[in-house]
Image: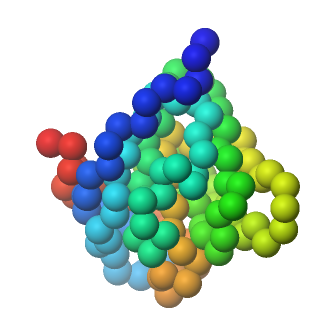
Amino acid sequence: MNNKLEIKKAQDTLIDLSFKNERPTLQINCSFRRTEAHSINLLTIIRDKEHPTLLSFEHQQLQTIIDGTGVHNALMAGFDAENKLIGVSFFNQVGTGTFSVLSQAKSVLIFPQEQFKFNVSEIQFFKLVRDGMI
């Protein structure tokens, strides 16, 4: 099976982040991409390192290989098929070599670590407010 499938063009979209605690819902603008690839390279996807990127995996595999080689100071929140948070990864490559994450997430939100003033593990789920693909 070919895992080098096309990653569809990025579109801007709005999402609501809901939290586990009493924190109010946060609406953010992000770049939104869909892909059927089950192996991706984050550096080729992140359009703007200061702008969040939401990536939706539309393949039938159980896991996605996410190559974070060269990504510095970024967080990745992983979500299941119901958009509920299932995990958080930190990318901070400062040396040489490769770094990859094997994820069961159906979508991931990648953003600079310093961008938001909340603990990423407090996210409960996200909701697509405006799908830029429409």
From where the camera sits, is residue 125 visible?
A: no
Q: Residue at 52%, 21% (x, y): give it.
A: 60
Q: Residue at 25%, 58% (x, y): give it.
A: 13
Q: Nearer the viewer, residue 110 or 67?
A: 67
- Asked if residue 70 is positioned above or below residue 113 in the image, the reply reads above
Quarter of the rendering occupied by the N terminus = top right
Q: Residue 98's spot in the image, x, y percent?
A: 80, 51
- Residue 19 sits in quarter: bottom left
Q: Residue 75's spot in the image, x, y percent?
A: 60, 67
Q: Residue at 74%, 48% (x, y): give it.
A: 100
Taking the view exactly as shown, the residue that stands out farthest to the bottom is 117
- Please count the marks in the image: 0
Taking the view exactly as shown, the residue that stands out farthest to the front is 96
From where the camera sits, is residue 123 visible?
A: yes
Quarter of the rendering occupied by the C terminus = top left
Q: Nearer the viewer, residue 133 or 6?
A: 6
- Asked if residue 115 is positioned above or below residue 79 in the image, the reply reads below
Q: Is 113 displayed left or right of 96 in the figure?
A: left
Taking the view exactly as shown, the residue that stands out farthest to the left is 134
